[in-house]
Image (cartoon, grey):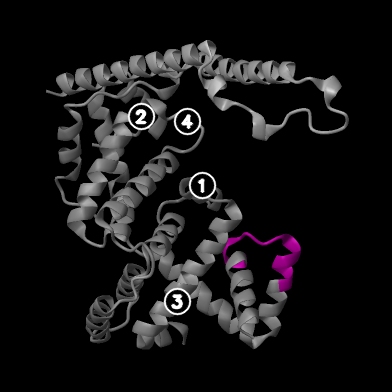
Amino acid sequence: MPTGLNDSEIISKVLSGDQQAYAELVTRYQNYVFTLALRFTKNREDAEEVSQDIFIKAYRALADFKGNSKFSTWLYTIVNNTCITFLRKKKLQTHSLDKEGVFEVADSQDSGLRANQVEQKSKIAMVNNAIKMLGADDAEIITLFYKSEQSLEEIAEILGLETNTAKVRLHRARTRLKEKMQQHFSEEVKDIYN
Amino acid sequence: MEANYRDMDERLWNYIDGASEVAERSAIEQLIQTNTEWKAKYHELLEVNTLLQSSELEEPSLRFTKNVMEEIARLHIAPATRTYINKRVIWGIGIFFITLILGFLVYGFGQIDWSSSDGKMPVDFGKIDYSKLFSNTYVNVFIMFNVVVGLFFLDRYLANKRKKFREEI
């Protein structure tokens, strides 16, 4: 049940021994963390496992959160590091997923979408599907910028980059997303632009 | 041509993100109003931006929070790094090594016979007998000291691990 406390107040409660207060932070950020993890792992089971691991790590290291940045920025740094470690362990490619399998998925999603009327909901579904086709790096930066309420400076801090590099990376990710949309959902894209 | 498009894209994304300077903003506004290509591109990118803003977050299973809370019930918050990394110890180690290097340098320069150099290098590096250097008692004592310190820290590390393991059980 939401308590109306802000992140810092909840953290103070947890640090002073109220372990149950942490549940509120988990509830507050679980969708953001899970979405980011899913961008890396590409499957829900792994994403759920990684997300749990992230919240456990964050709990263990909570005393190290100094409050210089937002809790979410600190948490997403853990997300980024844990997901990279996960990918290394799984030996998955972090770059472009322009592989046959993905195209097959895309085509089936594409034909499925074409059958429907292109309304706002299916447009959103199309964007979500296009994001899934991106490489983990691109999908992560787009999710951080649009869904996780992080400024470019904060994104740069999370990813360990210069702000300008993060900006360029975001531009490139959006360009690649647009290309994916045009490549796999051309009809819908035409409707949107007209 | 492609570079121009990339430049246009980048400038328009900056404009849409609100990251452009005032002068750049008015220049882009002017371009959008007067140039059909810029206008079309702007609307295209704006639409992508709107769609991205309205894209949805994924949701984990309903038991997610419960699972996390069950896991952390068995754990404790680790003490803050700043509480167990003592700055004085780090400074002490730094000063120790700097003093050691300075000591070696002073000792080394003290061994050089500057008066007999005649403009040449005062030391013939090819003729240095390194075996003498490493059989020196001080060097042996220094190496021994480091080995003992190394073993001490290894013991501490293993004892901590054992303690942690017992706590978890």
Tag 3, which secondary structure? helix
Residue indicated by mark 1: A154
- The magenta stretch spans residue B20: yes
Measured as percent of width and height from the top left, residue B31 is found at 70, 79
Disc with the residue nearer the chain's start (1 vs 3):
1
Residue A62: assigned label? 2
Tag 2, which secondary structure? helix
Same chain for labels 2 and 1? Say yes or no: yes
Same chain for labels 4 and 2? Say yes or no: yes
Residue indicated by mark 3: A178
User: On the picture, is B72 further left or further right than B22?
Assistant: left
Residue indicated by mark 4: A67
- Determine crowd level at label 1: few under 14, some 14-19, many 20+ residues with C-alpha closer than 10 A: many
Q: CA distance from mark 3 to mark 2?
A: 39 Å
Measured as percent of width and height from the top left, residue B48 is found at 46, 73
Labelled pair 4, 2 in contact (Cβ < 8 Å):
no
The residue shown at (26%, 36%) is A56
The residue shown at (32%, 48%) is A85
- Residue A156 visible in the picture: yes
- Determine crowd level at label 3: few under 14, some 14-19, many 20+ residues with C-alpha closer than 10 A: some
Q: Which residues are magenta?
A: B15-27
How many numbered circles does the render carry?
A: 4
Return the chain for callout 1.
Answer: A
Going by the numbered disc 3, the residue's amino acid type is Lys
Disc with the residue nearer the chain's start (4 vs 2):
2
Return the chain for callout 3.
Answer: A
Tag 4, which secondary structure? loop
Going by the numbered disc 1, the residue's amino acid type is Glu
Disc with the residue nearer the chain's start (2 vs 1):
2
